[in-house]
Amino acid sequence: MSVMGASTQNARETEQRARIIATAERLFREIGFQKTTVADIARELRMSPANVYRFFGAKSEINAAVARHLMNEVEQSAQGIAHGPGSAEQRLRALILSNEAMNAERYVADRKLHDMVEAALDENWPIISDHIDRIDAALEDVIRSGMQSGDFAEADAQLAARLVHAACIRYCHPRLMVECADRPTPTSAQMVEFCIAALRAGFRDLNRSATLSR
């Protein structure tokens, strides 16, 4: 096969995988990821289940691909905000509030998708850890730029990002968003302002402080 032929074949396979993922996501929203079978997906696409299995070795791989697609949209938005216009404070606010809104739309408003992410959390799917790392990286980029511009006090940007992420976890963790729905305060906007105040003031070497307190 020529280079051009191989490239065309790869493009077709990528397109077909995308169609399978999009169809699976729609069915997951309609009837739930546990009730959706490979046969259902194949029927919607007018192909055989065997053809679906050419692209995904098992139904669990389709589940993970749909979850990866949904999380990738959140991650791309976070990176876009992190490297977009505005001060570090403005970008940090926008990133956290956007993250909250996108996760709420996907996993709180849509109960069937919530069931999927619950399974991902309970079964410790690798994509969960990857997602946390990518959001941490976006937060770190914003915070480091704020430290470089003087908006935030100089400190360990990686640690600061993880502290901010931990402080705001109830506004982006699907399970906590549901469990804390009847606790309206503090709001995400209030928590962001708290984090910004801490970043402006700076913090001591927390590792050293923990050692000295023992």
Image (cartoon, helix red, strand yellow):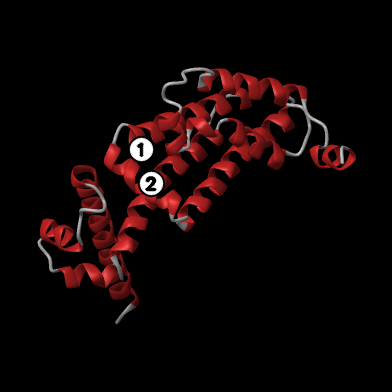
Quarter-of-image position of residue 143? top right
Kindly identify which numbered label has been placed on residue 84: none
Residue 51's spot in the image, x, y percent? 19, 71
Would you say the residues marked 1 and 2 are in contact, meaning their CB atoms lie under 8 Å apart?
yes
How much space separates mark 1 and mark 2, taking CA atoms? 7 Å
The local secondary structure at tag 1 comes to helix
What residue is drawn where x is 73% and y is 22%?
Answer: 200
Residue 8 shows up from this direction: no
Between 183 and 107, the residue placed more toward the observer is: 183
Task: Give the answer, above or below, for where 188 lies relative to 105.
Answer: above
The local secondary structure at tag 2 comes to helix
Q: Which residue is mark 2?
A: 117
Residue 14's spot in the image, x, y percent? 30, 62
Q: Amino acid at mark 2?
A: Val
Q: Which residue is mark 1?
A: 107
Between 14 and 85, the residue placed more toward the observer is: 14
Q: Which quadrant: the N terminus?
A: bottom left
Residue 15 shown left or right of residue 102 in the figure:
left
What residue is drawn where x is 40% and y is 43%?
Answer: 73
Residue 58 shows up from this direction: yes
Quarter-of-image position of residue 44? bottom left
What residue is drawn where x is 61% and y is 31%?
Answer: 167
Residue 154's spot in the image, x, y percent? 78, 32
